[in-house]
Image (spheres, helix red, strand yellow):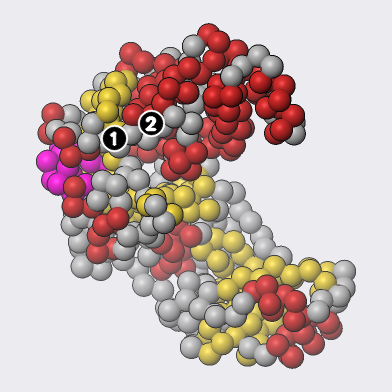
Amino acid sequence: MDLDAFLELLTPRGLRALGEAEELAGADPVAAATRMRRTYDAGLTSAALTQAGLRERARAKFGADAGRMYFTPHGLEQATRAEVAEHRARRLAARPGLRVADACCGIGGDLVALARAGCTVDAVDTDPLTVAVARANAEALGLADLVTVRRADAATVRPQDYDVLFADPARRTSRGRTFDPMAYSPPWPVVLDLVSRARRACLKVAPGIPYEFIPEGAEAEWVSYKGEVKEATLWTGRTPRQDVGEADASGPAGGGTDGDGRIGRRATLLPGPHTLAATGVRASTGPVGRYVYEPDGAAVRAHLVGEVAEMVHGRLPDPMIAYISGDEPVDTPWAARYEVDEVLPFSLKRLRAALRERRIGNVTIKKRGSAVDIERLRSDLRLSGDKSAVIILTRIMDKPSILICHPPHLHE
């Protein structure tokens, strides 16, 4: 879909075509295109059907708003899930009327959340189609009075003229997704230059960002939604406020610091929210007990396994692996709990025999610190039976090991 085709979608005729395309959702693509071509030309037909498909896919991220919004395939993939964007906007908008510079706005998911939180947003993007889509989204959601969108390079933004800089650099290249901040668009040096001139900054980055790329003095917050780590957010400048009732664990309001005091670390679980800040506690090591806990990925990314271990009165069976074991059944949103039936040294023969003895026909296989191919192992187990189990492949004091467990106890 090019810019001209998209702009035609915004005309009365284009909106009619889009409405008809949405009514054909789920129909055979060839039949849908043939039917629409009776009324519309090929370009508008293609644009309408593409947009209808994107809206359907977008419901998982944007809920009911998706039915009024506009998307590009790349923009939808990069866009923040609405619940995550809303959490971030609540943290950022300490007072109404903040002026925010959005240095790489994409299709506008974050500027929508910021505007709804009471911010005035000036947004830029380098791609003319993306700019048009973001502008249309602000209009469609009734936020045009709070948002301006223009085509410009992020490097031209003057963050010092605003209360807050927000940036979500693109993390895809011609070869696909990139995990190297130097390959972001704009690249990391440009982002850091913007940050250096901002009073406050909020940067959305990939959850796997190497720690050495995090600016000194920043707070790094990893966000998990329904158990899946979605992103990391870097906050610089004055620490953003924490919503009343947000925290559920002790720790400094700024999120605590890492071992050398260089950055703050925080993890947040959504829905909730539940927030855990670094306290500097170190988990002890010890034998596997009755229970094993799998910390949420946000806590693992934020190096907060020690804090989770303290919550469940647990210890680490291996000091380098993020599984926690304990003797008490402690409920926490920060970890899934499994009851341990048996601990074995890694052996396919022994594992197969143990599962056969327990009549296990269905297994969930998890691993940390193991190079075993899960699907090949599942096939090699030749399961039969009417019961279920969780198999954890890990190391215990650096020895390959297997934990056979009851299905998990998940706590909201």
**Neighbourhood count class around disc 2 (C-alpha, 10 Å): few under 14, some 14–19, many 20 upward:** many
Q: How many marks?
A: 2
Q: Which residues are magenta?
A: 191-202
Question: The disc labelled 1 sits on which kind of residue?
Answer: Thr
Evaluate if marks 1 and 2 touch, with contact meaning CB atoms under 8 Å apart. Answer: yes
For residue 217, side relative to residue 231 (left or right): left
Amino acid at circle 2:
Thr
Q: Could you classify mark 1 by the number of other residues whose Cα lies within 10 Å: few (under 14), some (14-19), or many (20 or more)?
A: some
Q: Residue at x 49, y 26 (%)?
A: 70
Does the stretch in magenta take in 3? no
Which residue is disc 1 drawn over? 126
- Report whether residue 151 is seen: yes
Of 367 and 133, nearer the camera is: 133
Q: Looking at the image, is 8 positioned above or below residue 378?
A: above
Q: Is residue 37 above or below residue 180?
A: above
Residue to which mark 2 is pinned? 130
Q: Is residue 57 left or right of residue 186?
A: right
